[in-house]
Image (spheres, rainbow, N blue to C red):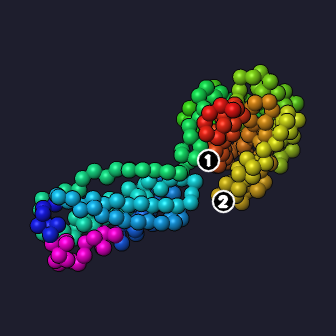
Amino acid sequence: MARATLAAIAARAVPKGDPLEVARVAAIQAVKNTASIIPYCHPIPVEFAGVGYRTEEDGIVVEVTVRAVARTGVEMEALTGASVAALTLYDMLKMLDETMAIGEVRLLEKRGGKSDAYGAAPPGLRAAVVVLSDSVAAGRADDTAGRLITERLRALGIEAPEPVVLPDDGQAIADRFRRLADGGGVDLVVSTGGTGLGPRDVTPEALLEVLERRVPGVEEAVRSYGQQRTPLAMLSRSVAGTRGRTLFVALPGSEAAARDGMDALFPAVLHALAAMRGTRHDGRGS
């Protein structure tokens, strides 16, 4: 902006009022309402939103800081707040200055959030996806949950071949799970299906025959996350645990439930997979 505009702000001579204070309030409102503006942002409880200004020779730099206790970062809230502050300044000052322009809006620093807490997948991870369904195995139904899980694993950088489909036969399921773990080439096995209360839902019992250690927190996370979205999640008997250096997670069979399960588990499970490989919390070997 022009120097005369900066002088008017300093002298509190802007006809519409103090643009810095109005923009500060606008930025804080924008931070709190980011989920209503940006479609893929989730509503989160914001703990702190601060707006600071730095006057330079030809303009004003707006810096917005946002803090929250959440599983996701708050960079979008901060960027939205800075953008709205800049637009508010422009709106209040445009009558004085036709030369104004809004410059770049960029992230200065991010701490916390999923990626900071858990990091990326350790290199070389291999997974197997097992679809457990009589109807899919017989060709009477299409597999959507297994494909979704496979795609999500690949997006995380985990090697995952096409899903294996088995009928709801407890012994066959247990045998396949043992071979996957004892073969030594699979770090993670995610199954989908057979965790309900139907007479052919035998996945938990088959998996319990195979596991050496249960991981109750993973099971609780899957059910808790699902329960926030549908009361039917309480009926799931999802099981998780380890055999050797392989982590097993049994998810429900519907596509929606599989999606919720993957959302609940990742990227936190990446930390478990790194730990099972002997990697310390600081990312170095044990």
At 56% from the left edge and 32% from the top edge, which residue is drawn? 157
The amino acid beneath tag 1 is: Asp
Image coords of residue 154 (percent x, y):
57, 32
Q: Is residue 48 left or right of residue 269?
A: left
Circle 1 packing at 10 Å, graded few (<14), some (14-19), many (20+), is some
Front in this rendered view, residue 109 or 91: 109
At 38% from the left edge and 61% from the top edge, which residue is drawn? 64
Q: Earlier in the sequence, mark 1 or mark 2?
A: 2
Question: What range is drawn magenta here?
Answer: 8-24
**Which corner quadrant holds the C terminus?**
top right
SS type, badge 2: loop
Whether residue 235 is situated above or below residue 135 in the rendered picture: below
Front in this rendered view, residue 146 or 13: 13
The amino acid beneath tag 2 is: Gln
Q: In this view, does 130 lie to the left or right of 112?
A: right
Q: Is residue 233 left or right of residue 89?
A: right
At 69% from the left edge and 36% from the top edge, which residue is drawn? 275
Q: Is residue 276 visible?
A: yes
Image coords of residue 69 (percent x, y):
56, 60
Q: Can residue 100 be seen in this view?
A: no
**Which corner quadrant holds the N terminus?**
bottom left
Distance CA(mark 1)–CA(mark 2): 12 Å
Image coords of residue 113 (percent x, y):
54, 51
At 64% from the left edge and 41% from the top edge, which residue is drawn? 281
SS type, badge 1: helix
Q: Which residue is disc 1 drawn over?
A: 263
Q: Which residue is disc 2 drawn over?
A: 228
Q: In which quarter of the image is residue 193?
A: top right
Q: In which quarter of the image is residue 26?
A: bottom left
Circle 2 packing at 10 Å, graded few (<14), some (14-19), many (20+), is few
